[in-house]
Amino acid sequence: MSSKKRILYISQEVTPFLKASEISSNVKTLAQKTQESGKEIRVFMPRYGLVNERRNQLHEVIRLSGMNMIINDVDHPLIIKVASIPSAKMQVYFIDNQEFFKRKAIVKDEKGKYFDDNTQRSVFFIRGTLETVKKLGWIPDVIHCHGWLTALLPMYLKTYFKDDPHYANTKVISSIYEDSFTGELDKNTLDILKFDGVEDSYFNHFKNDLSYASLTKTAIDHSDGVVLFSDNIDKEIIDYANDSKADTLKFVKEDEHFDNCSTFYDQIMGKEAKLAE
């Protein structure tokens, strides 16, 4: 087995498969720099209908596809696709499902209305990624989450996957961006979580509302580290991260921030090593 440290990136967006955004550009650059620093990486994102399969040369990975996942008592097939970013010398895996990701949009329709099934889409993406990584036989030292569509992963790692030996020693980091949503998550969000065996104590913030702030605070509560990836994050969120048990990496504008992330991974993994001594 390779002695290289392994970083799993799970992201709402990755360029060049979607247009450049703060999240999509940062994930591509960060993953590339992390790989160049000597660590192994895997990158996962949803296969939205916006992704041009022909132009980006996506192809299905048959040996990884074929699983079905039950979300809130409904069975959904999981398809895995992959494509390369030649300029970055790295691959990106895509979580695909016709019902959740065929639409030509990310989280809201052309009128700006957020989809009513974003929680289901989020859970399918998160669980689909973690199950696929298991099929790959690849054990990540750190999972780094990007975008609020991934914000439930830290909680799922501590609940749904808590007894899974594959992730027994995996640390999780949440990146916080300026990107947010208005209103609330799906009204059946708590039913979805409870169906997956998540106990009430893990989503205390959701007892007040299903807002972006509650979702982000829930992610922070169950993360080992938090990376502030914007200088326009709501002060309430920044203060909450700084007061949490998770280590927090502050934002800097220069490329130095990407180098800081690599050091931050070592810091998070180092805490685990010290506890094991």
Image (spheres, grey):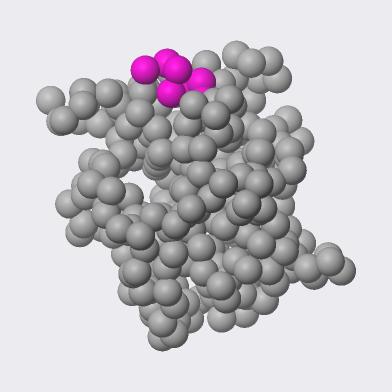
- The reply, left or right, for residue 178 in relation to residue 78 is right
Horizontal and vertical percent position of residue 123: 48, 66
Q: Can residue 12 be seen?
A: yes
Q: Is residue 24 above or below residue 194?
A: above
- Residue lying furthest right in this view? 111
Q: Is residue 260 above or below residue 74?
A: above
Seen from the viewer's position, the closer of residues 255 and 275 is 255
Horizontal and vertical percent position of residue 17: 64, 44
Q: Quadrant of residue 181?
A: bottom right
- Residue lying furthest bottom in this view? 73
Q: How many marks?
A: 0
Measuring 49% from the left and 26% from the top, which residue is drawn there?
89
Horizontal and vertical percent position of residue 111: 87, 69
Measuring 35% from the left and 28% from the top, which residue is drawn there?
40
Horizontal and vertical percent position of residue 6: 33, 32
- Residue lying furthest left in this view? 277
Q: Check the picture and name the quadrant holding the N terminus.
A: top left
Seen from the viewer's position, the closer of residues 73 and 29 is 29
Magenta region, residue range: 32-38
Seen from the viewer's position, the closer of residues 271 and 64 is 64
Q: Quadrant of residue 3?
A: top left
Measuring 84% from the left and 66% from the top, which residue is drawn there?
110
Q: Quadrant of residue 173?
A: top left
- The reply, left or right, for residue 231 in relation to residue 202 is right
Q: Check the picture and name the quadrant holding the C terminus.
A: top left
Q: Can residue 261 be seen?
A: no
The reply to whether the magenta stretch includes residue 35 is yes
- The reply, left or right, for residue 15 in relation to residue 275 is right
Main SS class of the magenta portion in the image? helix
Q: Is residue 230 above or below residue 262?
A: below
